[in-house]
Image (spheres, helix red, strand yellow):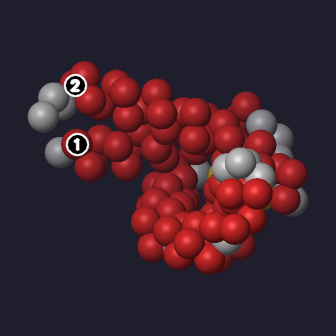
Amino acid sequence: MKLIAKWLLSATALLALAHLYPGVVVNSFGQALIAALVIGLFNALLRPLLIVLTLPVTVLTLGLFLFVINALMFWAAASVLDGFAVTGFGAALVGSLLYTLMGMVINLALERLFPQ
């Protein structure tokens, strides 16, 4: 139940992000659901590999390169989907930061709703 709630709220956050920030475009709630799923899959499968491969750069930049990796995951999801678009890398960076902040709020709310 918690996973479905997180997926629905993440899609809603992505749709809200598209309305708040002009660099991110989502055509419909259905496309937002698919985009949230793809972003989640990319973050679960590709992000750990990229973090390990770019560990020296991440250490040299004191962890700031992780923002670039998040933006790349956001941009990659937009590039493989039709109803979800990001205008460029800068928009992907800002969009991923805002989406991450919304995700943190969602996680906090869900932890209070569904305690372990």
Q: Residues within 10 Å of mark 1 (few under 14, many from 20)?
A: few
Q: Where does label 2 land, which residue?
A: 113
Q: Quadrant of residue 47?
A: bottom right
The residue tagged with tag 2: helix, strand or loop? helix
Q: Is residue 50 above or below residue 60?
A: below
* Residue 25: image location, x then y, percent: 73, 51
Q: Are marks 1 and 2 in contact (CB under 8 Å)?
A: yes
Residue 80 is marked as none
Whole-percent x, y for residue 26 in the image: 66, 52
Q: Nearer the viewer, residue 43 or 66?
A: 66
Q: Quadrant of the N terminus?
A: top left
Looking at the image, residue 55 lies above or below residue 33 = below
At a point 26% along the width and 49% down the height, the residue shown is 3
Q: Residue at x 58, y 51 (%)?
A: 28
Locate residue 27, reporting x and y percent: 65, 54
Identify the residue at image location x=46%, y=60%: 40
**Disc 2 residue crowd, few under 14, some 14–19, many 20+, Cα 10 Å:** few
Q: Which residue is mark 1?
A: 2
Which circle's residue, 1 or 2, is located before the other in the chain?
1
Closer to us: 53 or 3: 53
Q: Is residue 24 left or right of residue 13?
A: right
Q: Residue furthest left?
A: 116
Instruction: State the image coordinates of residue 100 (x, y, percent, origin top left).
Output: 57, 41
60 lies left or right of 28: right
- Kind of residue at disc 1: Lys
**Residue 1 appears left or right of 25:** left
Q: Residue at x 29, y 31 (%)?
A: 110
Q: Quadrant of residue 58?
A: bottom right
Q: Hey, what amino acid is under mark 2?
A: Leu
